[in-house]
Image: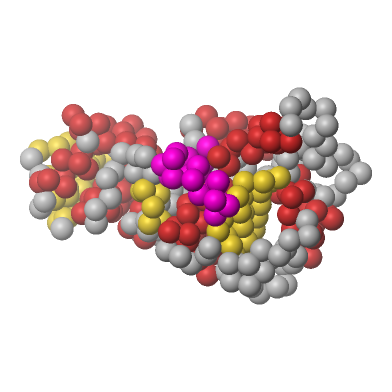
Amino acid sequence: MTRKLSTESADKNFQSLIFEDNDVLKILFGERDSNVRTVEERVGVHIHVRGNQITISGDEAKIGLAAKLLTEIYEVIKGGYSVYPVDIAFALRILKHNPSVNLKDLFLDNIPIATKKRFITPKSVNQKRYIDAMRKHDIVVAIGPAGTGKTYLAMALAIAALMNKEVERIILTRPAVEAGEKLGFLPGDIVEKINPYLRPLYDALHDMMDFEKASRLIQNGIIEVAPLAFMRGRTLNDSFIILDEAQNTTSEQMKMFLTRMGFDSKVVITGDITQIDLPPEKTSGLIEIQEILKSISGIRFIYFSSIDVVRHPLVQEIIDAYSQRP
């Protein structure tokens, strides 16, 4: 628990927080109080640490933001989440755009698989909405820029569903080549031709699962990674199906893909409509389904923006810069 002590002077505002669990407090502060210094710099307040008490001074609104951040991160750590410095930055960004958010609702909503480093949790409000949508709906369409976790989180939910025996297999697919999957000009046999285009899906898979186990599941057909063209003519039952890079599907390909869905299956479609590589005369299937499928209650659309980017901070700035071009 934390206790708050607030005081004011003629020229400055203060708020003190007293934390009762010293072990949790050490994690909250970070090595050599690095997390505290991060909050100071990014919020624009002064923080004084003395034992288990933090005193925050500065602008009243900024004090409130820093206090909420530290108090809720403290509760997140008590809940069993191992906070890293990058989490402080994510949490601060979340609270700046959504001050009413409870950080425990996000950081403690673990997808029950462990990566090589840590558990997977949402890092933004939209990521939380996305995860909830995938749990509740059979078809979810995620649209937004690179780095927002669209494919990665879908992969995590798919692996969790497979491990929990909710589905019998995972199917990961994407257009093998922009605008039509014309592989003839590439060297090698069909496997060598399509592999570079499916590599990102393999990378995400191997980040969440031991390489040998993943390879064994692929060899046994329990996890299938294949170009979109290979979906034609199939009915996919008891499957978790992810269509990645969907902005590069044509109208015909998208219809073909959607009608492959069988019983007890879940479909997640991801894409970035600002990076379409189709010829000008071709309509993106991802753009088209926003209008065609909007009235179907069993389908949920989730939209991401640069605010949801969880890569290097410069990626968010790059996306914003491109979006502002005339």
The residue depicted at 77 percent of the width and 48 percent of the height is 229
Q: Residue furthest top?
A: 187
- Quadrant position of residue 185: top right
The image shows residue 311, relative to residue 240, as above or below, that is above
Q: Can residue 295 be seen from the camera position used here?
A: yes
Q: Which residues are magenta?
A: 203-223
Q: Is residue 320 magenta?
A: no
Q: Quadrant of the C terminus?
A: top right
Q: Residue furthest right?
A: 281
The residue depicted at 61 percent of the width and 57 percent of the height is 241
Residue 155's spot in the image, x, y percent? 52, 51
Nearer the observer, 279 or 35: 279
Residue 141's spot in the image, x, y percent? 64, 58
Residue 148's spot in the image, x, y percent? 54, 44
- For the stretch drawn in magenta, the main secondary structure is helix
Marker count (numbered): 0
The residue depicted at 74 percent of the width and 27 percent of the height is 188
Q: Can residue 277 be seen from the camera position used here?
A: no
